[in-house]
Amino acid sequence: MKFVTQRKALAQKTFAPRTFFGAFTKNLCKRATQLTLSAAFGGALTGAATAGVLEETPVVPSGNDLHLQEILYEVRADESRVARFRYVMPLIRQGVEFTDIEEDFFHLCIGVAVPYLAIQDETVDQVIISMADRETTFGETTQVATQFFEAFSVQDGTCIWEGF
């Protein structure tokens, strides 16, 4: 599915993210935990195992270049936990369609999100992988960005496509 970002801001209870280069931090609050990672890691992450899983520019089946903008955690009103892996793929701006990168979403879920969550000892009910043609601020509406999304439930170490 292709979404041109003209959506309303998603309601969530989180504090403003903190970004630290080369390190991870967690900002815990009553209803949500949000972790923001810098796209410019500049050094070792939290260990060799994490560095191998969470590459700044992962290789995807389409062969297109992309980079991780951030990872966000949220707890929804029904108490389900969601991890959002937000990527930027500049080629989307040049006409890349969803069908051209469809396989990349599952690949990023099973090859990056699931191992990363296991290493970080995080348990979530849903993983949302998004790709945009440019960096965007989560929850803010923009008329110029094109974004694609896929949702997966995570069960027994695998990703199950849920679709939007």
Image (tube, grey):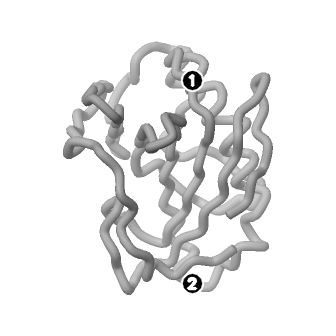
Q: Give residue 123's mark.
A: 1
Q: Amino acid at mark 1?
A: Thr
Of the 4 image quadrants, the one containing the C terminus is bottom right
**Image location of residue 7, percent across then percent down:** 44, 76
Is 119 or 127 nearer to us in this picture? 127
Q: Work out how far the residue at label 2 is from the one at label 1, CA to CA, in angstroms.
A: 36 Å
Image quadrant assignment for residue 44: top left
Question: Element type at marker 1?
Answer: loop
Q: Residue at x 43, y 38 (%)?
A: 75
Q: Residue at x 48, y 61 (%)?
A: 88
Q: Give residue 59's mark.
A: none
Instruction: Indicate whether 28 appears above or below 4.
Output: above
Of the 4 image quadrants, the one containing the N terminus is bottom right
**Image location of residue 112, percent across then percent down:** 63, 35
Q: Nearer the viewer, mark 2 or mark 1?
A: 1
Instruction: Indicate whether 104 appears above or below 154.
Output: below
Residue ID for mark 2? 94
**Image location of residue 4, percent across then percent down:** 51, 82
Instruction: Indicate whether 110 appears above or below 99.
Output: above
